[in-house]
Amino acid sequence: MTAPIILLVEDDPALRTLTARALQENGFAVRSASAAPEMWLALESGPVDLVLLDIMLPGTSGIDLCRALRQRSDVPIIFMSARSSETDRVVGLELGADDYIAKPFGVRELVARVRAVLRRPPLDRRSGEGDSGLLTFEGWTVNLPRRELMSPTGAVVDLTGAEFDLLVVLADHAQRIIARERLIELSRTRLGDSSDRSIDVLVSRLRRKLSGAGHAAPIVTVRGVGYMLNVAVERS
Amino acid sequence: MRRLVPSVGLLGQVVAILLLTMLIEFGVSTMLYERASQFSVRDDEARRLAEHLVISHRLVAERTAAERAAMADDLTTDRYEIHWDHAPPHVPPVAPSLDQMRRQIIEWEPSLRARDLRIRLVSPGSSSAVTGGLRLDDDSWLHFRTLAPVARLHFGFERITLALVPAIALMVIGGLMLRRALLPLRRLAVAADRVGHDEVEPVPEDGPGEVRRVVAAFNRMQARIRALIDTRTQALAAVGHDLRTPLARLRLRSESVEDVDTRGAIAHDVAEMEAMVTSLLAFLGGESNPETPVPVDLAVMCATLVDDASDAGRTADYAGPDHLELRLRRSGFKRALTNLVDNALHYGERLTIALDADADVVTVRVIDDGPGIPEGRLAEVLQPFVRLDPARRRDTVGFGLGLAIAMQAVQAEGGTLTLANRVPHGLEAVIRLNHPSPRT
């Protein structure tokens, strides 16, 4: 298996070198660009597996660049930004970035994010226009790019990272039973970072947070097997 | 918002209001005097006065000028005081004339018609008296005055009431009109009170000319202040962002340091600097655009903070309803709660978040079992840049802005944040929010 190719777009030369070195040491091939024109050249010169994009670049803003890039290609994008506010994060993710990393970041965090995005199956990312990354069931809305859950009454319902990931897995397999072992396996790779909470705890928390006025959350336990989201999920 | 017609000004409006009240007063008084001229006495009383006047006239007119005064005095009885003078009777011009009574008297004694009978009502004290005069042939005057109250009608009371009603009505009308004229000033006061707390819209420039000029000046001042703050905030935000790039370099460089201890120490320093930059930007608002309130499930937000803490291996519980929807500036409020939770976990071992909602108040309590804060310093620690232990014994990170940021965010929701110590030890941070539409 050849090394995944990362296109790094960053205007600060020293930070560009350091980031490139960190990625190379972790088994990635890196192509660097300092600004938009170089980025387009680098993209033309060969296939790229992921773009690591600084949000504040000279000339074009990273947000415009992301929009332009998204129009041409489905390549995964991770934003890097010195702005860590919620709004910036949301704007980046809504424009089609796959993830967001705030400066200053450590090598471990960077590599973990890059690997996580590369590991996601292409279907999991937004595929083509019209797909806004929304999952809906029983009035609940899961906003994938914003990683947000909205209640049927339109209120934002906070979930921990692990709970959100579990909900997405359940929704992806709606009306099918997912074995507990499979969820545990997923929790090691995908759900959360260092959570050693058992799946059962996560499920019971999700149930409480998804309980509506008077009726229980649509997550059923299949005794001895696993769990199931027993309602239809619509994607839009 | 300029008007084409120039305003008459505050002065003009006040003058107009005064003029109007005076017109009404005039109208009402005229009506009152009209009523008084209709004042009539019982027929027998009018007759008795008529007879006394006819007799007095005849007796006085027969005498020479020197004897007339004495004669007039002799004619004074318990009922009527008679008095002779060269001059016509002097009555205060405000005393209403009694046309009806005059008619009654003349009807009984038509000879008095030629005598230029003048008759008026005066009120010395509370009882009404009738006074007047008759002209003699040589243009001297016979004055008379009733000594007993003429009528048992409660005329005095009626008059007071009549005078009082328009006075009260005038006060109300005048008050309402002045209130209306001063409305723009009140709006200005409300807006001025809000400066510095939240976004202030320009105050509409209307009302009297003077007020309009004040409002316009206020709006310009507000715009200048906003521009000044914006410039500073942007400059500061730029500094914050620019600091993060070298921090990012430092962090990446530190990871190639061979010595584990040095690497850890550098990583710790970078994390601390990053925390300081973040809290400074949060406090000065350099990073987030003004948030708008959205519906949020506050109960789940609290529960999730507790879940995050227990996922991180801490002891934490949540007590409260499963759901509670409120409109909040979400990330600002969550940052406030996160700061309180971080404090609780920093100083204590056990975190509890308790949420209560009654008809009009939502209370969030963030409780720890740490050492608490000396009573005298409870209010002080809510101020920015105040840290409890200057020696930083407990690895305190940042500028001491955590609670100030929380305070700011809670105030943005129109709520209050207070701190209180717990018995036997521990601290309780209490957020109280208004709860306009209870929905549990």
Image: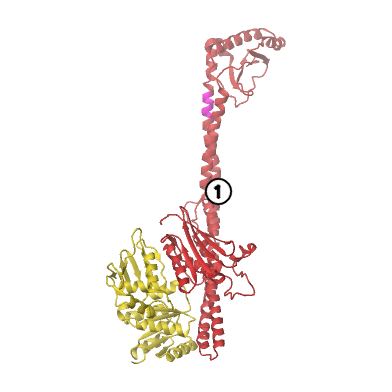
Chain colours: A yellow, B red
Q: How many marks?
A: 1
Residue A118 position within the rendered picture, expressed as x and y whole percent measured from the top left: 36, 83
* Residue A86 sits above or below residue B193 on the image: below
Q: Foreground residue, A133 or B150?
A: A133
User: Is residue A147 in view from this perspective?
Assistant: no
User: Is residue B292 in view from this perspective?
Assistant: yes
Which three-letter amino acid code belongs to the residue tagged 1?
Answer: Leu
Name which quarter of the figure residue B402 lies in. Answer: bottom right
Q: Foreground residue, B107 or B44?
A: B44
Q: Foreground residue, B286 or B182?
A: B286
Q: Is residue A224 left or right of residue B173?
A: left
Q: Residue at x 45, y 69 (%)?
A: B307
| Residue beneath disc 1 | B10
Q: Foreground residue, B108 or B240?
A: B240
Q: Which residues are magenta?
A: B29-35
* Residue B116 sits above or below residue B241 on the image: above
* Residue B337 sits above or below residue B147 on the image: below
Name which quarter of the figure residue A7 lies in. Answer: bottom left
For mark 1, give the secondary structure. Answer: helix
Q: Look at the image and tell me in which quarter the C terminus of chain B lies.
A: bottom left
Instruction: Specify the subunit that label 1 lies on.
Output: B
Q: Is A229 inside the magenta-drawn segment? A: no
Residue B64 position within the rendered picture, expressed as x and y whole percent measured from the top left: 70, 9
Q: Residue at x 49, y 81 (%)?
A: A104
Residue A156 position within the rendered picture, expressed as x and y whole percent measured from the top left: 40, 65
Q: Is residue A174 left or right of residue A109?
A: left
Name the magenta segment's main secondary structure.
Answer: helix
10 Å crowding of disc 1: few (<14), some (14-19), many (20+) = some
